[in-house]
Amino acid sequence: MSDLTNLTVAQIRDGHRAGDFSAVEVAEAFNANVAGAKVLNAFIVETPDHAIAAAKQADADRAAGTLKPLSGVPIGMKDLFATHGVQTTAASHMLEGFVPRYESTVSQKLWDAGCGMLGKLNLDQFAMGSSNETSYFGNVISPWRRKDGGNAALAPGGSSGGSSAAIAARLCPAATGTDTGGSIRQPAAFTGISGIKPTYGRCSRWGIVAFASSLDQAGPMARDVRDCAILLETMAGFDPKDATSLDLPVPNWEAALSSDLKGKKVGIPKEYRLDGIDPDIDAMWDAGIAMLKDAGAEVVEISLPHTKYALPAYYIIAPAEASSNLARYDGVRYGLRDLPQGAGLQDMYAATRAEGFGPEVKRRIMIGTYVLSAGFYDAYYTQAQKVRTLIARDFNTAFESCDVILAPTAPSAAFGLGEKTADPLSMYLNDVFAVPASLAGLPAMSVPAALNREGLPLGLQIIGKAFDEQGVLNAGLAIEERAGFTARAEKWW
Amino acid sequence: MAIDQDTVRKIASLARIAISDAEAAAMEGELNGILGWVEQLAEVDVTGVEPMTAVIPNKLRLRDDVVDADPLTGGNRRDDILANAPAPQHGFFGVPKVIE
Protein backbone atom coordinates (compact mmCIF):
# COMPACT_ATOMS: atom_id res chain seq x y z
CA MET A 1 0.00 0.00 0.00
CA SER A 2 1.24 3.51 -0.78
CA ASP A 3 2.13 5.70 2.18
CA LEU A 4 -1.13 6.71 3.81
CA THR A 5 0.48 9.87 5.21
CA ASN A 6 0.71 11.30 1.70
CA LEU A 7 -3.09 11.35 1.42
CA THR A 8 -5.15 14.50 1.76
CA VAL A 9 -8.13 14.79 4.09
CA ALA A 10 -10.51 14.22 1.17
CA GLN A 11 -8.56 11.14 0.06
CA ILE A 12 -8.53 9.70 3.58
CA ARG A 13 -12.24 10.37 4.03
CA ASP A 14 -13.21 8.91 0.66
CA GLY A 15 -10.72 6.02 0.74
CA HIS A 16 -11.85 5.00 4.20
CA ARG A 17 -15.47 5.19 3.13
CA ALA A 18 -14.71 3.03 0.10
CA GLY A 19 -12.94 0.44 2.24
CA ASP A 20 -9.49 0.95 0.68
CA PHE A 21 -7.89 1.00 4.13
CA SER A 22 -8.92 1.09 7.77
CA ALA A 23 -8.92 4.21 9.90
CA VAL A 24 -6.66 2.44 12.37
CA GLU A 25 -4.05 1.97 9.63
CA VAL A 26 -4.22 5.70 8.89
CA ALA A 27 -3.91 6.68 12.55
CA GLU A 28 -1.00 4.29 13.09
CA ALA A 29 0.83 5.69 10.05
CA PHE A 30 0.50 9.27 11.26
CA ASN A 31 1.32 8.31 14.87
CA ALA A 32 4.53 6.75 13.58
CA ASN A 33 5.44 9.91 11.67
CA VAL A 34 4.77 12.03 14.74
CA ALA A 35 6.93 9.77 16.90
CA GLY A 36 9.74 9.94 14.37
CA ALA A 37 9.82 13.73 14.05
CA LYS A 38 10.55 14.88 17.59
CA VAL A 39 13.44 17.00 16.37
CA LEU A 40 10.93 19.33 14.66
CA ASN A 41 9.32 19.99 18.08
CA ALA A 42 5.95 20.49 16.38
CA PHE A 43 3.94 18.91 19.20
CA ILE A 44 3.80 19.90 22.85
CA VAL A 45 1.73 16.83 23.75
CA GLU A 46 1.29 13.75 21.57
CA THR A 47 -2.02 11.92 21.86
CA PRO A 48 -1.66 8.69 19.85
CA ASP A 49 -4.31 6.97 21.95
CA HIS A 50 -6.89 9.62 21.10
CA ALA A 51 -6.18 9.13 17.38
CA ILE A 52 -6.43 5.34 17.66
CA ALA A 53 -9.66 5.45 19.68
CA ALA A 54 -11.31 7.71 17.11
CA ALA A 55 -10.03 5.46 14.32
CA LYS A 56 -11.48 2.34 15.95
CA GLN A 57 -14.78 4.15 16.27
CA ALA A 58 -14.57 5.15 12.58
CA ASP A 59 -13.95 1.56 11.53
CA ALA A 60 -16.87 0.38 13.68
CA ASP A 61 -19.09 3.12 12.25
CA ARG A 62 -18.17 2.06 8.74
CA ALA A 63 -19.13 -1.53 9.51
CA ALA A 64 -22.40 -0.33 11.05
CA GLY A 65 -23.16 2.09 8.23
CA THR A 66 -23.07 5.11 10.53
CA LEU A 67 -20.10 7.00 9.10
CA LYS A 68 -19.67 10.64 10.08
CA PRO A 69 -18.46 13.39 7.71
CA LEU A 70 -14.81 13.11 8.77
CA SER A 71 -14.66 9.55 10.09
CA GLY A 72 -11.14 8.21 9.96
CA VAL A 73 -9.39 11.57 9.58
CA PRO A 74 -6.76 12.29 12.26
CA ILE A 75 -5.74 15.93 12.76
CA GLY A 76 -3.42 18.08 14.84
CA MET A 77 -4.88 20.57 17.32
CA LYS A 78 -3.14 23.87 17.94
CA ASP A 79 -2.43 24.06 21.66
CA LEU A 80 -4.57 27.19 21.95
CA PHE A 81 -7.80 25.16 21.90
CA ALA A 82 -8.98 23.83 25.25
CA THR A 83 -9.19 20.04 25.11
CA HIS A 84 -10.95 18.09 27.83
CA GLY A 85 -8.46 16.07 29.86
CA VAL A 86 -5.48 17.02 27.67
CA GLN A 87 -2.99 19.67 28.75
CA THR A 88 -3.63 23.05 27.11
CA THR A 89 -0.81 25.55 27.49
CA ALA A 90 -0.89 28.24 24.77
CA ALA A 91 2.84 27.37 24.72
CA SER A 92 3.27 29.25 27.98
CA HIS A 93 4.85 28.45 31.33
CA MET A 94 1.80 30.17 32.84
CA LEU A 95 -0.51 27.37 31.71
CA GLU A 96 1.93 24.48 31.95
CA GLY A 97 0.01 21.60 33.49
CA PHE A 98 -3.41 23.18 32.86
CA VAL A 99 -5.84 20.37 32.04
CA PRO A 100 -9.23 21.76 30.97
CA ARG A 101 -12.46 20.25 32.27
CA TYR A 102 -14.20 21.40 29.10
CA GLU A 103 -13.76 21.28 25.34
CA SER A 104 -13.55 24.22 22.94
CA THR A 105 -16.48 24.50 20.57
CA VAL A 106 -14.32 24.14 17.45
CA SER A 107 -12.48 21.03 18.67
CA GLN A 108 -15.75 19.49 19.86
CA LYS A 109 -17.23 19.97 16.39
CA LEU A 110 -14.24 18.17 14.86
CA TRP A 111 -14.54 15.22 17.27
CA ASP A 112 -18.29 15.08 16.67
CA ALA A 113 -17.56 14.85 12.93
CA GLY A 114 -15.36 11.81 13.52
CA CYS A 115 -11.85 13.30 13.63
CA GLY A 116 -9.18 11.95 15.94
CA MET A 117 -6.42 13.97 17.59
CA LEU A 118 -2.72 13.24 16.97
CA GLY A 119 -1.59 15.79 19.52
CA LYS A 120 -1.45 19.39 20.68
CA LEU A 121 0.64 21.54 18.38
CA ASN A 122 3.30 24.01 19.41
CA LEU A 123 2.83 27.72 18.74
CA ASP A 124 4.15 31.12 19.69
CA GLN A 125 3.41 31.82 23.33
CA PHE A 126 -0.22 32.99 23.64
CA ALA A 127 -0.11 33.16 19.80
CA MET A 128 2.16 36.21 20.00
CA GLY A 129 4.85 35.87 17.38
CA SER A 130 5.55 35.26 13.71
CA SER A 131 8.22 32.58 13.90
CA ASN A 132 7.27 30.20 16.70
CA GLU A 133 10.33 31.40 18.64
CA THR A 134 8.38 32.67 21.66
CA SER A 135 7.10 29.23 22.75
CA TYR A 136 8.05 28.26 26.29
CA PHE A 137 8.48 24.73 24.95
CA GLY A 138 11.13 25.63 22.39
CA ASN A 139 11.17 26.58 18.71
CA VAL A 140 9.42 24.55 16.10
CA ILE A 141 11.85 23.82 13.27
CA SER A 142 10.53 23.97 9.73
CA PRO A 143 10.98 20.78 7.72
CA TRP A 144 12.08 23.03 4.83
CA ARG A 145 15.74 23.86 4.22
CA ARG A 146 17.37 26.21 1.77
CA LYS A 147 18.90 24.46 -1.21
CA ASP A 148 22.26 26.14 -0.61
CA GLY A 149 23.57 22.99 1.01
CA GLY A 150 23.55 24.61 4.44
CA ASN A 151 21.51 23.21 7.28
CA ALA A 152 20.28 26.49 8.75
CA ALA A 153 17.15 25.87 10.82
CA LEU A 154 14.26 27.88 9.38
CA ALA A 155 11.17 29.32 11.05
CA PRO A 156 7.88 27.55 10.26
CA GLY A 157 6.13 30.91 10.67
CA GLY A 158 3.85 31.81 13.49
CA SER A 159 1.94 31.74 15.52
CA SER A 160 0.53 28.46 14.12
CA GLY A 161 4.06 27.14 13.48
CA GLY A 162 3.52 23.69 14.95
CA SER A 163 0.49 23.27 12.70
CA SER A 164 2.33 24.38 9.55
CA ALA A 165 5.46 22.32 10.22
CA ALA A 166 3.47 19.21 11.10
CA ILE A 167 1.40 19.35 7.91
CA ALA A 168 4.40 20.09 5.69
CA ALA A 169 6.29 17.17 7.26
CA ARG A 170 3.30 14.80 6.84
CA LEU A 171 2.84 14.39 10.60
CA CYS A 172 -0.84 15.18 10.14
CA PRO A 173 -3.00 15.74 7.05
CA ALA A 174 -4.53 18.89 8.50
CA ALA A 175 -4.60 20.95 11.67
CA THR A 176 -6.41 23.76 13.36
CA GLY A 177 -4.89 27.21 13.42
CA THR A 178 -5.88 30.59 14.76
CA ASP A 179 -5.26 33.91 13.08
CA THR A 180 -5.11 37.23 14.91
CA GLY A 181 -2.84 39.13 12.52
CA GLY A 182 -1.74 36.47 10.04
CA SER A 183 -1.09 33.45 12.26
CA ILE A 184 -2.71 30.98 9.85
CA ARG A 185 -1.69 32.55 6.55
CA GLN A 186 1.96 33.42 7.16
CA PRO A 187 2.98 29.97 8.52
CA ALA A 188 1.05 28.34 5.66
CA ALA A 189 3.03 30.44 3.18
CA PHE A 190 6.34 29.63 4.88
CA THR A 191 5.79 25.87 4.65
CA GLY A 192 4.09 25.42 1.28
CA ILE A 193 0.61 24.56 2.55
CA SER A 194 -2.85 26.18 2.48
CA GLY A 195 -4.77 27.87 5.26
CA ILE A 196 -7.86 30.01 5.56
CA LYS A 197 -8.97 32.53 8.13
CA PRO A 198 -12.74 32.86 7.71
CA THR A 199 -14.83 35.97 8.29
CA TYR A 200 -14.59 37.12 11.91
CA GLY A 201 -17.32 35.30 13.83
CA ARG A 202 -17.60 32.21 11.59
CA CYS A 203 -15.78 29.97 14.08
CA SER A 204 -16.62 30.15 17.75
CA ARG A 205 -13.92 31.56 20.00
CA TRP A 206 -15.32 29.68 23.00
CA GLY A 207 -12.56 27.60 24.57
CA ILE A 208 -9.76 29.20 22.57
CA VAL A 209 -7.17 30.87 24.81
CA ALA A 210 -7.82 34.56 24.14
CA PHE A 211 -5.21 36.92 22.69
CA ALA A 212 -7.02 39.85 21.01
CA SER A 213 -10.72 39.07 21.00
CA SER A 214 -11.81 41.45 18.22
CA LEU A 215 -9.28 39.82 15.87
CA ASP A 216 -8.91 36.18 16.97
CA GLN A 217 -10.41 33.74 14.50
CA ALA A 218 -9.91 29.99 14.10
CA GLY A 219 -9.46 28.31 10.75
CA PRO A 220 -8.08 25.18 9.13
CA MET A 221 -4.63 24.51 7.71
CA ALA A 222 -4.13 21.68 5.24
CA ARG A 223 -2.31 20.65 2.10
CA ASP A 224 -4.87 21.91 -0.40
CA VAL A 225 -7.87 24.15 -0.90
CA ARG A 226 -10.45 21.35 -0.89
CA ASP A 227 -9.25 20.13 2.50
CA CYS A 228 -9.52 23.66 3.87
CA ALA A 229 -13.12 23.85 2.63
CA ILE A 230 -13.97 20.47 4.17
CA LEU A 231 -12.54 21.33 7.57
CA LEU A 232 -13.93 24.86 7.66
CA GLU A 233 -17.44 23.47 7.11
CA THR A 234 -16.98 21.39 10.25
CA MET A 235 -15.32 24.09 12.36
CA ALA A 236 -17.71 26.96 11.52
CA GLY A 237 -21.16 27.55 12.89
CA PHE A 238 -23.17 29.60 15.34
CA ASP A 239 -22.35 29.24 19.01
CA PRO A 240 -24.42 31.05 21.62
CA LYS A 241 -21.44 30.83 24.00
CA ASP A 242 -19.47 33.35 21.89
CA ALA A 243 -21.07 36.81 21.89
CA THR A 244 -19.54 37.64 18.50
CA SER A 245 -20.44 34.34 16.82
CA LEU A 246 -22.22 34.83 13.49
CA ASP A 247 -25.76 33.46 13.50
CA LEU A 248 -25.63 32.35 9.87
CA PRO A 249 -25.98 28.98 8.16
CA VAL A 250 -22.68 27.33 7.19
CA PRO A 251 -22.48 27.09 3.40
CA ASN A 252 -21.56 23.87 1.66
CA TRP A 253 -18.17 25.21 0.61
CA GLU A 254 -16.70 21.95 -0.64
CA ALA A 255 -19.62 21.13 -2.93
CA ALA A 256 -19.57 24.64 -4.44
CA LEU A 257 -15.83 24.69 -5.19
CA SER A 258 -15.22 25.96 -8.72
CA SER A 259 -12.08 27.32 -10.30
CA ASP A 260 -14.01 28.91 -13.17
CA LEU A 261 -13.65 32.64 -12.46
CA LYS A 262 -15.47 33.95 -15.54
CA GLY A 263 -17.27 37.17 -14.67
CA LYS A 264 -15.19 37.67 -11.51
CA LYS A 265 -13.01 40.67 -10.92
CA VAL A 266 -9.73 40.38 -9.04
CA GLY A 267 -8.36 43.51 -7.38
CA ILE A 268 -4.62 44.16 -7.20
CA PRO A 269 -3.88 46.67 -4.44
CA LYS A 270 -1.21 49.08 -5.63
CA GLU A 271 -0.15 49.93 -2.06
CA TYR A 272 1.05 46.33 -1.58
CA ARG A 273 3.83 46.89 -4.13
CA LEU A 274 6.58 47.66 -1.64
CA ASP A 275 9.85 49.30 -2.63
CA GLY A 276 12.82 47.03 -2.20
CA ILE A 277 10.78 43.86 -1.77
CA ASP A 278 12.31 40.52 -2.74
CA PRO A 279 11.92 40.29 -6.57
CA ASP A 280 10.86 36.64 -6.17
CA ILE A 281 7.78 37.86 -4.29
CA ASP A 282 6.80 40.29 -7.03
CA ALA A 283 7.42 37.65 -9.71
CA MET A 284 5.16 35.18 -7.87
CA TRP A 285 2.49 37.86 -7.55
CA ASP A 286 2.63 38.61 -11.28
CA ALA A 287 2.43 34.89 -12.03
CA GLY A 288 -0.63 34.66 -9.79
CA ILE A 289 -2.30 37.50 -11.67
CA ALA A 290 -1.73 35.62 -14.92
CA MET A 291 -3.19 32.43 -13.41
CA LEU A 292 -6.41 34.15 -12.36
CA LYS A 293 -6.72 35.77 -15.80
CA ASP A 294 -6.30 32.32 -17.27
CA ALA A 295 -9.14 31.12 -15.03
CA GLY A 296 -11.38 33.72 -16.64
CA ALA A 297 -11.15 36.59 -14.17
CA GLU A 298 -10.75 40.21 -15.07
CA VAL A 299 -7.92 41.95 -13.23
CA VAL A 300 -8.34 45.52 -11.98
CA GLU A 301 -6.04 47.79 -10.02
CA ILE A 302 -7.46 48.92 -6.70
CA SER A 303 -6.32 51.26 -3.96
CA LEU A 304 -6.25 50.59 -0.22
CA PRO A 305 -4.87 53.98 0.82
CA HIS A 306 -4.47 53.34 4.56
CA THR A 307 -2.44 50.14 4.13
CA LYS A 308 0.73 51.59 5.66
CA TYR A 309 -1.13 52.37 8.87
CA ALA A 310 -2.53 48.86 9.36
CA LEU A 311 0.49 47.44 11.19
CA PRO A 312 0.93 50.31 13.64
CA ALA A 313 -2.84 50.27 14.34
CA TYR A 314 -2.64 46.51 14.90
CA TYR A 315 0.26 46.91 17.31
CA ILE A 316 -1.88 49.20 19.45
CA ILE A 317 -5.18 47.33 19.25
CA ALA A 318 -3.89 43.76 19.66
CA PRO A 319 -1.65 44.53 22.68
CA ALA A 320 -4.43 46.61 24.26
CA GLU A 321 -6.84 43.70 24.04
CA ALA A 322 -4.12 41.28 25.15
CA SER A 323 -3.30 43.32 28.24
CA SER A 324 -6.95 43.11 29.22
CA ASN A 325 -7.44 39.44 28.29
CA LEU A 326 -4.26 38.28 30.01
CA ALA A 327 -5.18 40.03 33.25
CA ARG A 328 -6.92 36.76 34.14
CA TYR A 329 -3.58 35.06 34.82
CA ASP A 330 -3.30 35.94 38.47
CA GLY A 331 -2.05 32.78 40.14
CA VAL A 332 -5.40 32.28 41.85
CA ARG A 333 -7.84 30.39 39.64
CA TYR A 334 -5.66 28.33 37.30
CA GLY A 335 -2.15 28.17 35.97
CA LEU A 336 1.11 29.04 37.63
CA ARG A 337 1.40 30.59 41.09
CA ASP A 338 4.62 32.12 42.36
CA LEU A 339 4.24 33.07 46.02
CA PRO A 340 7.49 34.48 47.40
CA GLN A 341 8.07 33.98 51.14
CA GLY A 342 5.87 36.38 53.08
CA ALA A 343 4.37 37.97 49.96
CA GLY A 344 0.90 39.48 49.91
CA LEU A 345 -1.69 39.21 47.16
CA GLN A 346 -0.33 42.03 44.97
CA ASP A 347 3.24 40.70 45.20
CA MET A 348 1.96 37.25 44.29
CA TYR A 349 0.27 38.60 41.17
CA ALA A 350 3.43 40.42 40.08
CA ALA A 351 5.75 37.49 40.82
CA THR A 352 3.44 34.99 39.11
CA ARG A 353 3.17 37.09 35.98
CA ALA A 354 6.90 37.81 35.89
CA GLU A 355 7.60 34.09 36.08
CA GLY A 356 4.77 32.84 33.85
CA PHE A 357 5.02 35.15 30.84
CA GLY A 358 7.84 35.20 28.29
CA PRO A 359 9.53 38.41 27.08
CA GLU A 360 7.30 38.98 24.00
CA VAL A 361 4.12 38.48 26.01
CA LYS A 362 5.35 40.90 28.67
CA ARG A 363 6.28 43.42 25.99
CA ARG A 364 2.80 43.31 24.49
CA ILE A 365 1.04 43.48 27.86
CA MET A 366 3.18 46.50 28.74
CA ILE A 367 2.46 48.26 25.44
CA GLY A 368 -1.24 47.50 25.85
CA THR A 369 -1.28 48.74 29.43
CA TYR A 370 0.43 51.96 28.37
CA VAL A 371 -1.84 52.77 25.41
CA LEU A 372 -4.92 52.17 27.58
CA SER A 373 -3.65 54.20 30.53
CA ALA A 374 -5.13 57.51 31.59
CA GLY A 375 -3.89 60.39 29.47
CA PHE A 376 -2.80 58.21 26.52
CA TYR A 377 -6.00 56.32 25.71
CA ASP A 378 -7.29 58.80 23.11
CA ALA A 379 -3.93 59.50 21.51
CA TYR A 380 -3.17 55.83 20.97
CA TYR A 381 -6.13 53.51 21.38
CA THR A 382 -9.00 55.67 20.10
CA GLN A 383 -6.85 56.92 17.24
CA ALA A 384 -5.98 53.33 16.28
CA GLN A 385 -9.65 52.31 16.34
CA LYS A 386 -10.48 55.25 14.06
CA VAL A 387 -7.73 54.21 11.67
CA ARG A 388 -9.17 50.69 11.82
CA THR A 389 -12.49 52.11 10.63
CA LEU A 390 -10.68 53.75 7.71
CA ILE A 391 -8.91 50.48 6.82
CA ALA A 392 -12.24 48.61 6.78
CA ARG A 393 -13.72 51.43 4.68
CA ASP A 394 -10.84 51.08 2.19
CA PHE A 395 -11.79 47.44 1.66
CA ASN A 396 -15.49 48.25 1.31
CA THR A 397 -14.70 50.81 -1.36
CA ALA A 398 -12.34 48.43 -3.17
CA PHE A 399 -14.96 45.68 -3.18
CA GLU A 400 -17.28 47.94 -5.17
CA SER A 401 -14.99 47.27 -8.15
CA CYS A 402 -13.76 43.72 -7.47
CA ASP A 403 -14.84 40.39 -5.96
CA VAL A 404 -11.58 39.22 -4.40
CA ILE A 405 -8.16 40.74 -3.81
CA LEU A 406 -4.87 39.05 -4.70
CA ALA A 407 -1.62 39.87 -2.88
CA PRO A 408 1.41 38.10 -1.48
CA THR A 409 0.90 36.49 1.94
CA ALA A 410 4.26 37.58 3.39
CA PRO A 411 7.03 39.91 2.21
CA SER A 412 9.65 37.15 2.27
CA ALA A 413 10.14 33.40 2.35
CA ALA A 414 10.86 31.70 5.67
CA PHE A 415 13.74 33.28 7.54
CA GLY A 416 16.26 31.53 9.75
CA LEU A 417 15.58 30.96 13.43
CA GLY A 418 17.22 33.76 15.40
CA GLU A 419 17.49 36.13 12.42
CA LYS A 420 14.78 38.50 13.58
CA THR A 421 14.54 37.94 17.32
CA ALA A 422 16.84 40.83 18.27
CA ASP A 423 14.49 43.45 16.85
CA PRO A 424 10.77 43.10 17.65
CA LEU A 425 9.88 45.63 14.95
CA SER A 426 11.49 43.69 12.11
CA MET A 427 9.50 40.64 13.24
CA TYR A 428 6.26 42.63 13.30
CA LEU A 429 6.85 43.85 9.72
CA ASN A 430 6.58 40.27 8.49
CA ASP A 431 2.80 40.54 8.87
CA VAL A 432 2.48 43.66 6.70
CA PHE A 433 0.27 41.97 4.07
CA ALA A 434 -1.70 39.81 6.50
CA VAL A 435 -2.78 42.32 9.12
CA PRO A 436 -5.11 44.58 7.07
CA ALA A 437 -7.63 41.76 6.38
CA SER A 438 -7.54 40.85 10.08
CA LEU A 439 -8.34 44.41 11.11
CA ALA A 440 -11.29 44.39 8.69
CA GLY A 441 -12.49 40.92 9.81
CA LEU A 442 -12.39 39.61 6.23
CA PRO A 443 -11.91 36.04 5.03
CA ALA A 444 -8.42 35.48 3.64
CA MET A 445 -6.37 32.46 2.67
CA SER A 446 -2.86 31.58 1.62
CA VAL A 447 -2.09 29.03 -1.07
CA PRO A 448 1.37 27.87 -2.09
CA ALA A 449 2.32 29.40 -5.44
CA ALA A 450 6.03 29.03 -6.15
CA LEU A 451 9.50 28.29 -4.83
CA ASN A 452 11.97 31.14 -4.52
CA ARG A 453 15.57 30.97 -5.75
CA GLU A 454 16.56 29.32 -2.43
CA GLY A 455 14.04 26.54 -3.00
CA LEU A 456 11.66 27.79 -0.30
CA PRO A 457 7.88 28.05 -0.72
CA LEU A 458 6.07 31.34 -1.26
CA GLY A 459 2.36 31.90 -0.74
CA LEU A 460 -0.28 33.98 -2.48
CA GLN A 461 -3.03 35.53 -0.42
CA ILE A 462 -6.65 35.92 -1.49
CA ILE A 463 -8.81 38.34 0.51
CA GLY A 464 -12.59 38.24 0.09
CA LYS A 465 -15.67 40.16 1.05
CA ALA A 466 -17.17 39.46 4.46
CA PHE A 467 -19.01 36.11 4.41
CA ASP A 468 -17.61 35.22 0.95
CA GLU A 469 -15.32 32.35 1.92
CA GLN A 470 -16.53 30.65 -1.25
CA GLY A 471 -15.05 33.35 -3.46
CA VAL A 472 -11.77 33.10 -1.59
CA LEU A 473 -11.65 29.29 -1.82
CA ASN A 474 -12.54 29.33 -5.52
CA ALA A 475 -9.80 31.82 -6.41
CA GLY A 476 -7.43 29.76 -4.26
CA LEU A 477 -8.41 26.65 -6.19
CA ALA A 478 -7.80 28.42 -9.52
CA ILE A 479 -4.26 29.25 -8.39
CA GLU A 480 -3.68 25.78 -6.96
CA GLU A 481 -4.67 24.11 -10.24
CA ARG A 482 -2.38 26.37 -12.26
CA ALA A 483 0.60 26.72 -9.94
CA GLY A 484 1.02 22.95 -9.83
CA PHE A 485 2.83 23.26 -6.54
CA THR A 486 4.01 19.75 -5.69
CA ALA A 487 7.29 20.55 -3.95
CA ARG A 488 7.77 19.17 -0.46
CA ALA A 489 10.44 19.30 2.16
CA GLU A 490 12.99 16.56 1.68
CA LYS A 491 13.05 14.37 4.76
CA TRP A 492 16.15 14.99 6.92
CA TRP A 493 14.64 14.53 10.38
CA MET B 1 6.75 61.02 23.40
CA ALA B 2 9.54 58.90 24.77
CA ILE B 3 9.11 57.05 28.04
CA ASP B 4 11.78 56.75 30.73
CA GLN B 5 12.61 53.92 33.12
CA ASP B 6 10.36 55.29 35.83
CA THR B 7 7.45 55.13 33.39
CA VAL B 8 8.43 51.58 32.44
CA ARG B 9 8.32 50.63 36.13
CA LYS B 10 4.94 52.35 36.52
CA ILE B 11 3.51 50.46 33.52
CA ALA B 12 4.88 47.20 34.90
CA SER B 13 3.25 47.95 38.21
CA LEU B 14 -0.10 48.67 36.54
CA ALA B 15 0.26 45.41 34.58
CA ARG B 16 1.22 43.53 37.77
CA ILE B 17 4.48 42.25 36.33
CA ALA B 18 7.54 42.34 38.60
CA ILE B 19 10.60 43.62 36.71
CA SER B 20 14.22 44.09 37.72
CA ASP B 21 16.18 47.28 37.05
CA ALA B 22 18.02 45.53 34.24
CA GLU B 23 14.73 44.50 32.63
CA ALA B 24 13.39 48.04 33.00
CA ALA B 25 16.47 49.37 31.25
CA ALA B 26 16.11 46.89 28.39
CA MET B 27 12.39 47.53 28.05
CA GLU B 28 12.87 51.29 27.93
CA GLY B 29 14.60 50.95 24.57
CA GLU B 30 12.23 48.29 23.20
CA LEU B 31 9.05 50.08 24.19
CA ASN B 32 10.31 53.41 22.87
CA GLY B 33 11.14 51.74 19.57
CA ILE B 34 7.61 50.37 19.24
CA LEU B 35 5.86 53.51 20.51
CA GLY B 36 7.94 55.74 18.23
CA TRP B 37 6.87 53.60 15.30
CA VAL B 38 3.13 53.53 16.11
CA GLU B 39 3.13 57.29 16.54
CA GLN B 40 2.87 57.68 12.76
CA LEU B 41 -0.86 57.04 13.26
CA ALA B 42 -1.14 60.63 14.51
CA GLU B 43 -0.65 61.89 10.93
CA VAL B 44 -3.87 60.21 9.72
CA ASP B 45 -6.77 62.62 9.30
CA VAL B 46 -9.60 61.04 11.28
CA THR B 47 -11.95 64.01 11.26
CA GLY B 48 -15.51 62.73 11.55
CA VAL B 49 -14.42 59.07 11.74
CA GLU B 50 -15.95 56.92 14.46
CA PRO B 51 -13.67 54.45 16.25
CA MET B 52 -14.48 50.89 15.25
CA THR B 53 -16.51 48.95 17.80
CA ALA B 54 -17.49 45.82 15.85
CA VAL B 55 -15.60 44.58 12.84
CA ILE B 56 -18.60 42.66 11.47
CA PRO B 57 -21.96 44.27 12.26
CA ASN B 58 -23.51 41.97 14.81
CA LYS B 59 -26.24 42.62 17.32
CA LEU B 60 -25.49 41.55 20.86
CA ARG B 61 -27.89 38.88 21.97
CA LEU B 62 -29.52 38.29 25.31
CA ARG B 63 -29.90 34.71 26.37
CA ASP B 64 -33.10 33.46 27.92
CA ASP B 65 -33.30 34.27 31.61
CA VAL B 66 -32.94 30.67 32.68
CA VAL B 67 -30.64 29.39 35.43
CA ASP B 68 -27.94 27.01 34.13
CA ALA B 69 -29.38 27.22 30.62
CA ASP B 70 -26.11 25.89 29.22
CA PRO B 71 -24.68 22.95 31.13
CA LEU B 72 -21.11 23.92 30.20
CA THR B 73 -21.31 27.49 31.44
CA GLY B 74 -24.00 27.12 34.07
CA GLY B 75 -23.57 26.52 37.79
CA ASN B 76 -22.95 23.49 40.00
CA ARG B 77 -19.48 22.89 38.60
CA ARG B 78 -17.40 23.80 41.64
CA ASP B 79 -15.03 20.87 41.45
CA ASP B 80 -14.41 21.43 37.73
CA ILE B 81 -13.68 25.08 38.35
CA LEU B 82 -11.29 24.37 41.21
CA ALA B 83 -9.58 21.47 39.44
CA ASN B 84 -6.79 23.67 38.05
CA ALA B 85 -6.52 26.13 40.94
CA PRO B 86 -2.99 26.23 42.35
CA ALA B 87 -4.11 26.30 46.01
CA PRO B 88 -7.78 25.43 46.50
CA GLN B 89 -8.97 25.23 50.11
CA HIS B 90 -12.29 23.96 51.47
CA GLY B 91 -13.99 24.40 48.12
CA PHE B 92 -12.66 27.93 47.57
CA PHE B 93 -9.75 29.57 45.76
CA GLY B 94 -6.92 30.01 48.24
CA VAL B 95 -5.00 33.30 48.37
CA PRO B 96 -2.43 34.78 50.74
CA LYS B 97 -3.88 36.57 53.75
CA VAL B 98 -5.30 39.95 52.65
CA ILE B 99 -6.62 41.25 56.00
CA GLU B 100 -4.43 41.41 59.11
Image (tube, coloured by chain):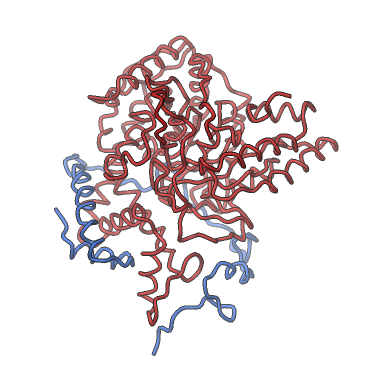
Chain colours: A red, B blue
* Nearest the eye: A281 or A455: A455
Q: Is residue B13 above or below residue B32?
A: below
Q: Is residue A128 above or below residue A484?
A: below
Task: Give the percent coordinates (x, y) of residue A261.
Answer: 49, 15
- Residue A171, by quadrant, is top right
Task: Give the percent coordinates (x, y) of residue A354.
Answer: 36, 64
- Residue A22, by quadrant, is top right
Tell me if A225 is positioned left or right of A179 in this view: right
The residue under the point 32% across, 49% down is A317
Tell me if A43 is positioned left or right of A63 in this view: left
**In the image, farthest residue toward the right:** A64
**In the image, farthest residue toward the left:** B1
The residue under the point 54% across, 47% down is A204
Tell me if A193 is positioned left or right of A308 in this view: right
Q: Is residue A389 visible?
A: no
Q: Is residue B28 visible?
A: yes
The residue under the point 33% across, 28% down is A397
Q: Is residue A289 above or below residue B3?
A: above
* Nearest the eye: A417 or A483: A417
Task: Give the percent coordinates (x, y) of residue A247.
Answer: 55, 43
Q: Is residue A222 above or below residue A424?
A: above
Quadrant showing the N terminus of chain A: top right
Task: Give the percent coordinates (x, y) of residue A483.
Answer: 48, 16
